[in-house]
Image (tube, helix red, strand yellow):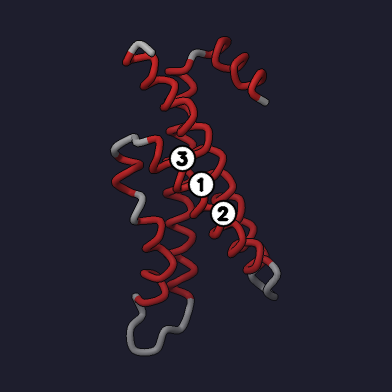
Amino acid sequence: MKRWLEGLEARHGVDSLTERTRQVVLISYITLLALLVWSGMAMEAGANPLTPILIRTLPLLLFLPSILGKRPRGHAWLCFVSLLYFIQGVMVATLPGQGLLGMAEALAALGLFSGAMFYARFRSRQMKAARGE
């Protein structure tokens, strides 16, 4: 795996890979947030209809400063949180009539995990190269 990633970096350049993986993170992040808001609006929440939306989206929203600030450590932590959303998507996919929504959520979370993982690696390497290490 390490040899494959180093070959990828040599062929495409760390700057290009960093930018591509950032785009994957942004697209997956926005898609996952949209799916969570949409599914949260469909839930019956009683007195306060915003409660399911906030409960579902708050963990992701906490990572918004790290994503906007392009911090590799925040992206590494985002990988762990995205796995929780992947598990939730798989569980929702097993519910009757919710298969498509659950699979979309699981795929968006998987894209977020992959993008954030690779972004953390490539951005760290990019920052080390800029410092001259």
Q: Secondary structure at mark 3?
A: helix
Seen at 56% across and 10% down, the residue is 10
Seen at 59% across and 56% down, the residue is 86
Q: Are marks 2 and 1 in contact (CB under 8 Å)?
A: yes
Which residue is disc 2 drawn over?
A: 83
Please name the amino acid that badge 1 sits on: Cys
Seen at 64% across and 70% down, the residue is 98
The quadrant of the rendering that contains the N terminus is top right
Q: Is residue 101 visible?
A: no
Numbered label tally: 3
Seen at 43% across and 56% down, the residue is 33
Which residue is disc 3 drawn over?
A: 25
Quick one: 99 or 25, which is closer to the camera?
Answer: 25
Find the distance from the CA under tag 2 to the CA under tag 1. Answer: 7 Å
Q: Is residue 53 visible?
A: yes
Relative height, residue 18 to residue 44 (above, below): above
User: Crowding near pointer 3: few (<14 within 10 Å), some, many (20+)?
Assistant: many
Q: Residue 85 appears in which quarter of the rendering?
A: bottom right
User: Crowding near pointer 2: few (<14 within 10 Å), some, many (20+)?
Assistant: some
Which residue is disc 1 drawn over?
A: 79
Please name the amino acid that badge 2 sits on: Leu
The quadrant of the rendering that contains the C terminus is top left
Q: Position of residue 56 (x, y in %)?
A: 44, 67
Q: Is residue 51 left or right of residue 113?
A: left
Q: Is residue 76 left or right of residue 70?
A: right
